[in-house]
Image: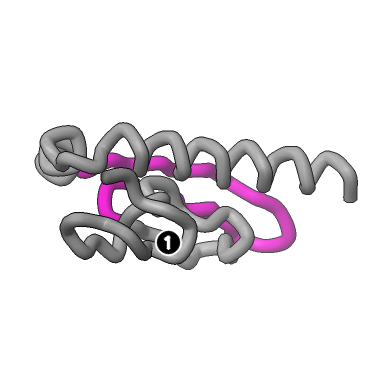
Amino acid sequence: MPCDMEGVLMERETTCCGNMFPDLDRLEDNQPVRVRVFEVLLESKGIGLSGRRITADPEQWKRCVACEQYRSCYDLSMAKLLLFLAVRQVE
């Protein structure tokens, strides 16, 4: 059974459903934002960004792909990411 936005009606309770990608709204300079698989870091030395780093944990990715809720989780994660990007374009 696929997960839903509240995490209800799932055969197996998972707190990560729909959270494959970091919450980009929480990004702050020099403070990594990490979720199960990915980590994003905006590097800053002064007033501007000096770099961006995105890393992935290959072992955790294998566990995600093996999860019975992978497809539903991935779809929800992508929808949240696309909605974030769309809303950001409106600002």
Q: Quadrant of the N terminus?
A: top left
Secondary structure under the numbered disc 1 in the rendered image? loop
Q: Position of residue 18 (x, y in %)?
A: 41, 50
Left or right: residue 40 compared with residue 29: left
Question: What residue is rendered at 26% in x and 38% in y?
Answer: 70
Q: Position of residue 84 (x, y in %)?
A: 67, 47
Toward the right, the furthest residue is 91
Q: How is the image coloured?
A: one colour
Question: What residue is rendered at 36% in x and 64% in y?
Answer: 8
The image quarter containing residue 29 is bottom right
Q: Which residue is mark 1?
A: 32
Q: Main secondary structure of the magenta part?
A: strand
Question: What residue is rendered at 35% in x and 51% in y?
Answer: 3
The answer to which of 56 and 87 lies nearer the viewer is 87
- Residue 40 magenta-highlighted: yes
Q: Is residue 33 visible?
A: yes
Q: Amino acid at mark 1?
A: Pro
Q: Position of residue 28 (x, y in %)?
A: 58, 65
The answer to which of 60 and 1 lies nearer the viewer is 1
Q: Is residue 39 visible?
A: no
The answer to whether 18 is drawn above or below residue 69 in the figure is below
Question: What residue is rendered at 35% in x and 43% in y?
Answer: 73
Left or right: residue 67 compared with residue 23: left
Left or right: residue 84 compared with residue 38: right
The image quarter containing residue 44 is bottom right
The answer to which of 64 and 44 lies nearer the viewer is 64
- Residue 37 magenta-highlighted: yes
- Report the magenta residues as a range: 36-57
